[in-house]
Image (cartoon, rainbow, N blue to C red):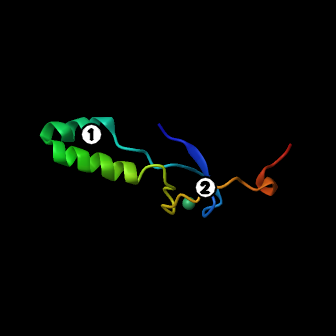
């Protein structure tokens, strides 16, 4: 599940980084609770960021950049 957001740093719409993968989470939890929890916390912390600059500087695009036909 990905979302498009407007990055204030990159000045463009980007697809936010995904959260923890359910498949990997289950796989790690089968191997052991600790690596599974560490992965979920790590993946959650890096989720929802700009893949270009890694920031969460979400903003509203300027009206000048919206092209009206
Ligand atoms: Zn960015």
Tell which residue pokes out farthest to the left in this image.
Answer: 31
Tell which residue pokes out farthest to the right in this image.
Answer: 69
x and y, in percent, of residue 8 in the image: 63, 60
Q: Which residue is more in the foreground, 46 or 67?
A: 46
- Check residue 58 in the rendering and tell me which mark sits there, or answer none: 2
Image quarter where the C terminus lies is: top right
Dot 1 lies on which element? helix
x and y, in percent, of residue 18 in the image: 43, 45
x and y, in percent, of residue 35 in the image: 19, 48
Residue at 26% x, 40% y: name it.
Answer: 24
- Check residue 37 in the rendering and tell me which mark sits there, or answer none: none
**Ligand 1 located in image quadrant:** bottom right
- Tell me if residue 9 comes above or below residue 13 in the rendering: below
Q: Which residue is more in the foreground, 68 or 43?
A: 43
Residue at 65% x, 55% y: name it.
Answer: 59
Q: How many marks?
A: 2
Find disc 1 in the rendering and name its residue. Answer: 25
Marks 2/1: CA distance? 28 Å
Quick check: is the Cβ at mark 1 less than 8 Å away from ligand 1? Answer: no
Is 50 displayed left or right of 8 in the figure? left
Quick check: is the Cβ at mark 2 less than 8 Å away from ligand 1? Answer: no
Q: Which residue is more in the foreground, 60 or 37?
A: 37
x and y, in percent, of residue 13 in the image: 62, 51
* Label 1 Cα crowd, 10 Å radius (few <14 / some 14-19 / many 20+): some
Q: Earlier in the sequence, mark 2 or mark 1?
A: 1
Q: Which residue is more in the foreground, 56 or 13?
A: 56
Is 39 displayed left or right of 18 in the figure? left
Residue at 43% x, 49% y: name it.
Answer: 47
Dot 2 lies on which element? loop
């Amino acid at each position: 599940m990905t979302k498009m957001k407007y990055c204030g740093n990159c000045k463009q719409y980007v697809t936010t980084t995904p959260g923890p993968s359910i498949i990997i989470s289950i796989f790690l939890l089968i191997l052991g609770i600790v690596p599974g929890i560490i992965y979920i916390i790590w993946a959650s912390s890096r989720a929802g960021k700009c893949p270009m600059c890694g920031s969460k500087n979400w903003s509203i695009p300027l009206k000048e950049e919206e092209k009206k036909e």
